[in-house]
Amino acid sequence: MSHDPISSLPGRDKASAARMHHRCARLTVASVVLAATAALLTGCGGDSTDNASARTGASASDADPSQSMDGMSDMAMGDPSATPADRIPGAEVVKGTFALLDTRPPGMDDVKGAAWLAQGSKGTTVTVSLTGLKPGDAYMAHLHAQQCSADNGGEHFQFDKGGATTPPNEVHLMFKADKSGMGKTTVNNPRKTGQDALAVVVHPRKAMDNRIACADFDY
């Protein structure tokens, strides 16, 4: 049988001891509640932070359609709604007609088109327009430093040779063929190529080595 130490005290001492006991009990309960609440909030806070980060990342990715292939923006590689190179006011424009290459993949025998390169006060503008492509497929085009007869255009043209292999040091165009198999886009670069960009080559986005066609610019 347990012994209650409070019951053995005199009346006044017994009342004081009882009040002290109750205060300690309330403090203990409050401490437990606070500890539990803190733990709960900590857990929720961590999860919310993680979820918020995930949501932020997903939202940024979904809301920014310009993020694209190889981490580059679509706008850096072409804008179908931009003013075409052959319509840039006051610019010097050269044109090239695409010729099929032996490296083209199967099904590309009917590809035709042209490219324009304009140089003016705002730098260089390049436009490519092709038909006979596979509807819905993505394609890439690049300015090249050699003519088509020299190893199908050779290496990519670079403003700073040996520099970055991405825009703005190179001129890339990315586009998709519509339902009819036509693809067209325009890209701008603040620097001028001079006459060092001799050709433009187009190939499938998923088969970079399978060059479809090449166009020499008629400087």
Image: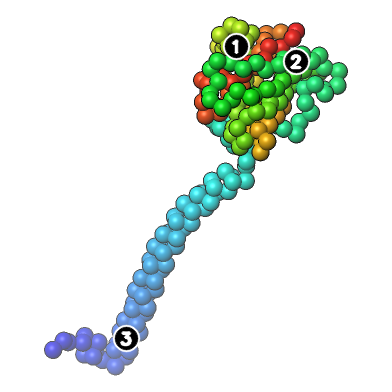
- Dividing the image into 4 quarters, which one contains the N terminus? bottom left
Q: What residue is pinned by disc 3?
A: 18
Residue 181, horizontal then vertical, whole percent: 65, 33
Q: Residue at x 81, y 14 (%)?
A: 92
Image vertical order of residue 12 relative to residue 171, above or below: below
Image vertical order of residue 87 relative to residue 26, above or below: above
Residue nearest the viewer, comparing 132 with 71:
132
Seen as rendered, the residue at the extreme right is: 90
Q: CA distance from mark 2 to mark 1?
A: 16 Å
Q: What residue is pinned by disc 1?
A: 153
- Dot 3 falls on a residue whose secondary structure is helix
The reply to whether discs 2 and 3 touch (Cβ–Cβ < 8 Å) is no
Residue 87, horizontal then vertical, whole percent: 82, 23
Q: What residue is pinned by disc 2?
A: 95
For residue 113, what is the image quadrant? top right
- Dot 1 falls on a residue whose secondary structure is helix
127 vs 209, left or right, is: right
- Dot 2 falls on a residue whose secondary structure is strand
- Dividing the image into 4 quarters, which one contains the C terminus? top right
* Residue 49 visible in image: no
81 vs 63, left or right, is: right
Residue nearest the viewer, comparing 116 with 35:
116
Residue 94, horizontal then vertical, whole percent: 77, 13
Q: CA distance from mark 3 to mark 1?
A: 97 Å
Q: Residue at x 71, y 8 (%)?
A: 195
For residue 186, what is the image quadrant? top right
Crowding around mark 2 (Cα neighbors within 10 Å: few <14, some 14 to 19, many 20+) is many
Image vertical order of residue 79 relative to residue 127, above or below: below
Residue nearest the viewer, comparing 11 with 176:
176
Q: Residue at x 58, y 11 (%)?
A: 152
For residue 69, what is the image quadrant? top right
Name which residue type carries label 2: Lys
